[in-house]
Amino acid sequence: MPRIRDDVAKVVCPYCRERVELFVDPETSGSFVEDCAVCCRPWSVQVSVDEDGNRRADVLPAQ
């Protein structure tokens, strides 16, 4: 699960496998849907905070 740094997570699209920078608003938590900037297919993005306070983003194919 990529760590969010300066409100950006570097993720890999689950469809086209391209590396993409994903902006994550500092106030965002939980899940939301975002389209890949390369192939335009929808992702399900899960934003979480670990016990050290680091925010992380997990990207899966949207259903």
Image (cartoon, rainbow, N blue to C red):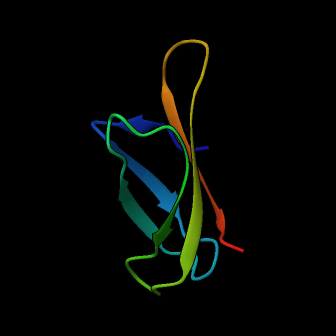
Taking the view exactly as shown, the residue that stands out farthest to the bottom is: 39
Where is residue 46 shown, x and y percent of the image?
A: 60, 48
Point out the residue furthest to the right here. 63
How many marks the image carries: the answer is 0
Quarter of the picture holding the N terminus: top right
Location of residue 47 with respect to 39 vertically, above or below: above
Q: Is residue 23 left or right of residue 34?
A: left
Placement of 44 over or under 58, stated as above or below:
below
- 41 vs 2, nearest the viewer: 41
Q: Position of residue 55 (x, y in %)?
A: 48, 30
Residue 37 horizontal/vertical position (percent): 37, 77
Q: Nearer the viewer, residue 30 or 54?
A: 30
Furthest residue in direction left, as rendered: 6
Image coords of residue 6 (percent x, y): 27, 36
What residue do we see at 57% from left, 69% from top? 43
Question: In which quadrant is the C terminus drawn?
Answer: bottom right
The part of the image, by quadrant, that contains residue 4 is top left
In-image side of 25 versus 40 (left or right): left
Task: State whether residue 37 is above or below residue 34.
Answer: below
Taking the spot 46% from the left edge, 75% from the top edge, the residue there is 35
Q: Looking at the image, which residue is at 62% across and 80% down? A: 15
